Image: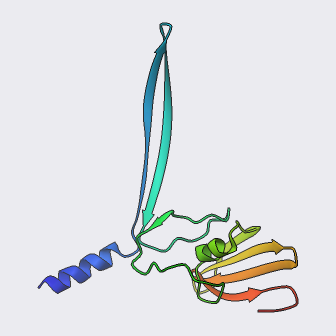
Amino acid sequence: MRLPILFFCAAALGGCSVDMGGFAFQSETKGGVTTTTTTSGSAGISTREPVLTPEGECSVGVSLDPSTRPLPKEIAPGITECELVKLKGKPPTDVLIGASGKGQREVQVLYAEPGGRELYLFTDNRLGRIVKPGGEG
């Protein structure tokens, strides 16, 4: 009886994300004058792997995805968008995000390197093809 409940809970939680935000007030009195300031912050946690935003940053800082794996040693087909940025060690020059006719997430990540432009093509957060100067890929 417990097994069906476990599967139901796992299915219900699949792809969930939590975003938290808040603010704080701080008052300080000097010379009879009270000054109140506010600060705000936010955090996000997701059960899905992080993906790139149009600004070239990872969408979520912390991933609770059970498929989270150690950083690959090299750029190769199958890595994620955020793994590419970590391996490159710098933000991309440009990121284009769209959808295929099949409803898949398609992302083009451009790096302007000294030897020419490098284009990395992702489908559903997995690197499928690399286009480098000279027609490699």
**137, above or below 60, in the image:** below
Residue toward you, 17 or 79: 79
- Residue under the image location 63 percent in, 90 percent down: 77
Q: Is residue 124 left or right of residue 32?
A: right
- Residue under the image location 71 percent in, 75 percent down: 109
**91, above or below 70, in the image:** above
**63, above or below 43, in the image:** below
- Relative image position of residue 49 (x, y in whole percent): 49, 74
The quarter of the rendered structure image containing the N terminus is: bottom left
| Residue 53 figure quarter | bottom right
**40, above or below 86, in the image:** above
The quarter of the rendered structure image containing the C terminus is: bottom right
| Residue 104 figure quarter | bottom right
- Residue under the image location 64 percent in, 82 percent down: 122
- Relative image position of residue 59 (x, y in whole percent): 55, 64
Q: Is residue 48 left or right of residue 118?
A: left
| Residue 87 figure quarter | bottom right
